[in-house]
Image: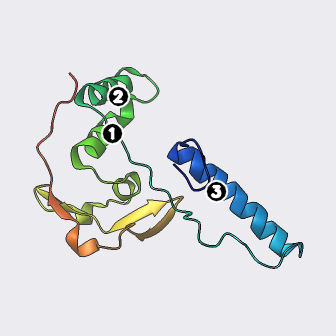
């Protein structure tokens, strides 16, 4: 249960409501209606657990790309994302200089987000070198 609540809210609902309430209090402070936020101790960051795709879902997703005439050219890219687990921005930021001769391993240390080159989300570029897995057929 959330503080002061008699029923449990979903994490996403709690986060949305808390974000709205915080924005209202901040606007009131800026407008001079109040002097300070009386709720500084409320937890604002709520982590929502991700649920990975099952193998059957992965097969359906890849088959959807493969069979669609408008997006079939993304099939290999989607397979790479599923096969390696790299973030989309990291995959977009890959360059040939990041791939070893013979394509046996790859270094992830740069990303591209909204057209801007930057370091990876975790800034741990030295530890993001891994072997490239053999091509896997998720869907025939």
Q: Which label's residue is closer to the chain start, 1 or 2?
A: 2
Task: Name the residue beneath numbered marker 3.
Answer: 18
| SS class, disc 3 | helix
**Relative depth, front residue between 35 and 95:** 35
- Dividing the picture into quadrants, the one containing residue 28 is bottom right
What's the residue at 24%, 65% (across, down)?
A: 98
The location of residue 86, given as percent across then percent down, is 30, 53
Q: Residue furthest bottom?
A: 35
Mark 1 burial class by Cα count in 10 Å: few <14, some 14-19, many 20+: some
Q: Are marks 1 and 2 in contact (CB under 8 Å)?
A: yes
What's the residue at 27%, 38% (across, down)?
A: 79
> Where is the C terminus found, in terms of image quarters?
top left
Distance from disc 1 to disc 2, alpha carbons, whole Å, reads 9 Å
Distance from disc 3 to disc 2, alpha carbons, whole Å, reads 34 Å
Taking 82 as reference, is 128 above or below it? below
What's the residue at 29%, 31% (across, down)?
A: 58
| SS class, disc 2 | helix
Q: Is residue 38 left or right of residue 111?
A: right
Distance from disc 3 to disc 1, alpha carbons, whole Å, reads 35 Å
**Label placed on residue 61:** 2
| SS class, disc 1 | helix
Q: Nearer the viewer, mark 1 or mark 2?
A: 2
**Label placed on residue 78:** 1
Taking 115 as reference, is 109 above or below it? below
Q: Is residue 124 left or right of residue 115?
A: left
């Amino acid at each position: 249960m959330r503080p002061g609540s008699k029923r449990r809210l979903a994490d996403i609902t709690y986060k949305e409501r808390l974000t709205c309430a915080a924005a209202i209090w901040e606007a009131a402070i800026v407008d001079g209606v109040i002097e300070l936020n009386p709720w500084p101790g409320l937890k604002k960051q709520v982590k929502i657990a991700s649920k990975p795709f099952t193998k059957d879902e992965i097969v359906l997703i890849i088959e959807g790309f493969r069979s669609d005439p408008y997006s079939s050219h993304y099939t290999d890219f989607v397979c790479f994302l599923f096969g390696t687990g790299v973030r989309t921005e990291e995959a977009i930021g890959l360059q040939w200089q990041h791939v070893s001769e013979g394509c046996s391993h790859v270094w992830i240390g740069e990303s591209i987000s909204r057209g801007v080159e930057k370091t990876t989300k975790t800034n741990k570029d030295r530890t993001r070198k891994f072997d490239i897995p053999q091509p896997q057929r998720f869907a025939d």
